[in-house]
Amino acid sequence: MRQVNAEQVERLRSPKPAIAIEVASLASILRYRAAERPNDPGYIFLPDRGGGRHQITYAELYRRARALALRLAVHGKRGDRAVLLFPPGLDFVVAFFGCLLAGIIAVPMMIPRRGSRRDASTAIFADCSPRFAITYRDLVAVARPDLGNRFSDVELEWLFVDAPGAEPNPNVALPALERADIAFLQYTSGSTSTPKGVIVSHDNLLQNLEMIRIAFGNTPQSTHVTWVPHYHDMGLILCILQSLYIGALCVLMAPVSFLQRPLSWLRAIHEYRAEVAGGPNFAFDLCVKRHRPEEMQGVDLSCWKLAYNGAEPVRAATIERFASTFAPYGFSANSAHPAYGMAEATLLISSGKRGAGPTLLTVDRDALQNGKAVASTPNHHVHRIVGCGRPLIGERLAIVDPDDRRRLRAGQIGEIWVAGPHVAQGYWCNAEATAAVFGAIIDGEPAEIWLRTGDLGFLDENNELYITGRIKDLIIIRGVNHYPQDIENTVQDCHTALRQHCGAAFSMLDQNDEEQLVIVQEVERTYRHRFAIGEIIGSIREAVNREHEITPREIVLIRTGTLPQTTSGKIQRSLTKQMFLAGSLAVLQ
């Protein structure tokens, strides 16, 4: 078994791109679009509260982004970081491209929730030490004046895209970008204590955008419609940046618009004759759940050629329910397009062909749990899994035993490893994690560095990739990553009767094959005979919903000292889950 350090990672990385692209950055493509098609709308935003749509042409986007870039160049230097704090809208797009033009490293972020203790923003600020915070003036002055106070102890300069101030000096030169330069940091979601910023170079970005174009079969006619947040890599790369890359229109919606009225997403696809639109698995289930024939009158979805489904486990039942429900409106089952990706590979890792439809496989569940994918037999438990496509052009993908690091054969379950020019440069200022995740070598093979995804899966004989689980205890619900220790801390802080460091959070599939949260928690011995179970469960449910925006499916209170732990005191979440399913926990009545 071999492991390389952070310095060897850079030396071993192949310098040759898989796909030749003649531009140095996406900023060059924006300049080209502005010159070639200045009056064409590049982006349209549909406001949440109705009213007229907002749009921006390529020329206007370049003009505004360049004006911001000149201001950044005056006040900062190449390589400085800038956090982008924007609600849904076109200003985010202007700010992102302004950073690219100026050689400033963009850091897309969710606006911190007011008064929330579960907030990664402080940790992200501490990790990347931003020079700028870019937003629009009314957000800080009117809607969220608390933001200024929240980051008052950080040496930070606020820049507002809607208040340019003094005319920028035309003699200021913008930097000549190189493909090796860092484009932006994509912070992984879920952990509030140790967020990691994935370093995405201009080359990584261009390589993966080309891979996406080929895999999805996109053209300038491939209009996109998305509600996925701008700061999420799916919303940013798969929609906002891919559409500019191919020269297609991108229609943006606010996430709240979709969550409150999911059919408005389908109506937007119809109205703009979009070819490409998608989201996490839960989005398709939500459309089915909220389906009302009277709200779908006149909607024609025959234009929708690629309905990508990713960011969380893809369910066969979801695909089938959605296709059946919306077939009367012209949706083709072959448009369903499961895919797999992660921020550490810029975004996309595997994909099928446009129009081919999903690949569904029925396997023996017991064999699956034992690390093998075999066809189901009579009288055995069966499990249906969805293929997430094949490796991309220019990419290498392997299934590897995570312990001995040897390549596995087709049908054997192991960790998914990825190599290629789209694999990011590592984690910002975290050499140890970079070497561990980005610096793996397959034992017994020539020295080539691989990205360890932490996900489990297998390749079939046709090289189709199937995702079966996660090595880590990461919980993914509705496309959002949740670390169990964060949820456990929230639980234990919400009531004095709950014992610290003695709880386990995990997910399990319900009867609809959807991930649900389960919480198992010890109660302090001194409270065993003087507490109301209903009151405490209510407190837990409220705290988890408030801090993590999840509603637990099951909350189980158990006796002191009965939670499975290692000799060093680590929680054995997997064993706790097994005991929960077997009904062998010491449940308080």
Image (spheres, helix red, strand yellow):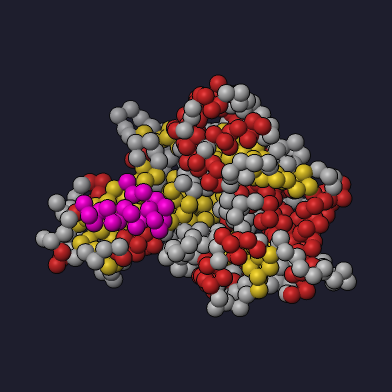
Q: Residue furthest left?
A: 529
Question: Which secondary structure type mostly characterizes the magenta part of the structure?
Answer: helix
Q: Is residue 31 left or right of residue 480?
A: right
Residue at horizontal 44%, vertical 50%? 476
Seen in the picture, residue 526 relative to 586 is either above or below; the reply is below
Q: Is residue 62 visible?
A: yes
Q: Which range is magenta?
A: 534-553
Q: Nearer the viewer, residue 232 or 452?
A: 232
Q: Is residue 472 left or right of residue 146?
A: left
Q: Is residue 536 left or right of residue 482?
A: left
The percent coordinates of residue 294 (x first, y second) are 52, 24
Q: Nearer the viewer, residue 30 or 389?
A: 30
Seen in the picture, residue 37 relative to 65 is either above or below; the reply is above
Q: Nearer the viewer, residue 585 or 234?
A: 234
The percent coordinates of residue 49 (x first, y second) are 58, 43
Q: Residue furthest front?
A: 142
Indicate whether residue 544 is drawn in magenta: yes
The percent coordinates of residue 457 (x first, y second) are 48, 47
The percent coordinates of residue 240 (x first, y second) are 68, 49
Q: Residue 8 is drawn in which quadrant? A: bottom right
Q: Is residue 465 visible?
A: no
Residue at horizontal 68%, vertical 72%? 80
Residue at horizontal 62%, vertical 25%? 300
Q: Residue furthest top?
A: 328
